[in-house]
Amino acid sequence: MTHNSATESKTQFLEIVFLWIAGISAAMQFSKFSVSYDALLQYYQAGETLTGAALSLVGVVGLIFGAFAGLIASRIGYLRVLMGALFLGGILSFIQASLPSFSVLLITRLLEGFSQLGVVVAAPTLIAKLSAPRHKSLTMGLWGTFFGVAFAVTGWLGKNILEQHGIQTLLFGHGTLIFTMGVIVFFTLRKNAVLDMSASVPNPNGFLQQLLQVYRNPRSLIPSLVFLCYTCTLVSLLTYIPRLVSDTKVQALMMVCLPLLSTSGTFIAGALAQYIMKPQKVALMSYSGVALSACLLTLVATQPLWFALMTGVLILFLGMIPGAALAMIPALARTPEEQAQGYGLIAQFGNLGATIGPPAFALLITLYGLFGLVGMVLCICLLGSIFSFIASRISTHKTV
């Protein structure tokens, strides 16, 4: 362990950027189907609900195995898990690029869940290991933007590829990217001394006992519930809100700008949580901003530019929530073990939100249009605000 203490004082930024890009390529497993939603709907003729399920099915594996993943990865090795996840993701994208039957497509989406979960559990753990203590807030803030960046890049480049070359090229391009990142990460990190985690002592408790301990700990659980409300909303809004605008130019602009605003919100939240207010208060403020913006959407529904502008404000506030949730974990945790549990649960609850959000929003939009969307957003904001308030009460009673 002594060699680690010497090297941990230096942050390995290049390696961290590669891991961040690997995370972006994994998040594109959601965004590639979001941007190609209409094309997939037209090609497979499977209906809104089943196509929405294909979008969210990636999260099912994380929903079921999220908490296990952190425990298993610590035994197998985070780098091995990351490598396997990236290569599996590449292979599955190549299969999807052949446009197989819809049932085979659904199976590949389910298997992509293992790939996505492996990356979101292993990559931030490796980033934290490669970061000096004084840079951990910065590097974890960078990691927190990977989802929004993935949607921004896919909305820009992916949309152009889709329009000019079709779904197959888009899916093949994603497979090439995620596979290439696997190769780069392997050659960059395989001999990195800082990532030698062989000295870690295995937990003597069984898996079930460890899991129950994680779920019973409010310092790990509450930030994950705050994060759950965010992921339940973000994927759905980025997918469905632009389609509520009749102007195609405004719609195209929204698909590029909204993810960028989400990413900007994450950076803003990190700065606020570090210098101005506690992350719990940042989360409360963010959910209030999302709720107010959603209500104002109903007043400008017939004006595309104003609707796009108000949606941008909503997404900016929404993007602040993951920054606040990630900052809550070290703020609330009393031990490194609690921090690890918190990040593991965030991976699981994030997948839960991404799984249940799109079908629920699709159903309400089909039934009630914009008012169905706004009503769902308000309910989620209420829950998120309650969880944020509970988190603020926990920090008040924090013991050292």
Image (spheres, rainbow, N blue to C red):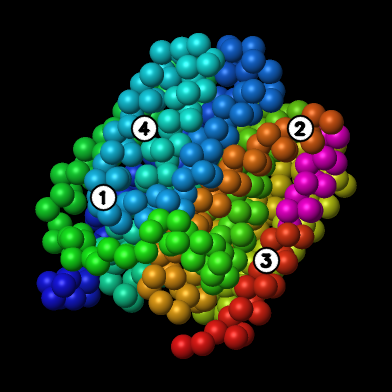
CA gap between label 2 and label 1 equals 40 Å
- The residue beneath circle 1 is 76
In primary-sequence order, the first of circles 4 and 2 is 4
Q: Nearer the viewer, mark 1 or mark 4?
A: 1
Numbered mark located on residue 363 in the image = 2
Residue 215's x, y, as percent? 54, 62
Answer whether labels 3 and 1 touch (C-beta < 8 Å).
no
Dot 3 falls on a residue whose secondary structure is helix
- The kind of secondary structure element at disc 2 is helix
Q: CA distance from mark 1 to mark 4?
A: 19 Å
Q: Check disc 3 and give the amino acid type.
A: Phe
Q: CA distance from mark 3 to mark 1?
A: 33 Å
2 or 1: mark nearer the eye: 1
Q: Main secondary structure of the magenta part?
A: helix
Residue at numbered disc 3:
387
* Chain-order first, disc 3 or disc 4: 4
Query: On screen, 154 above or below 393?
Result: above
Kind of residue sitting beneath label 2: Leu
Circles 2 and 1: CB distance less than 8 Å? no
Residue at screen point 54% across, 15% down: 102
The amino acid pointed to by label 1 is Ile
The residue beneath circle 4 is 89
Label 2 crowd (10 A; few <14 / some 14-19 / many >=20):
some
Residue type of the residue flagged with mark 4: Gly
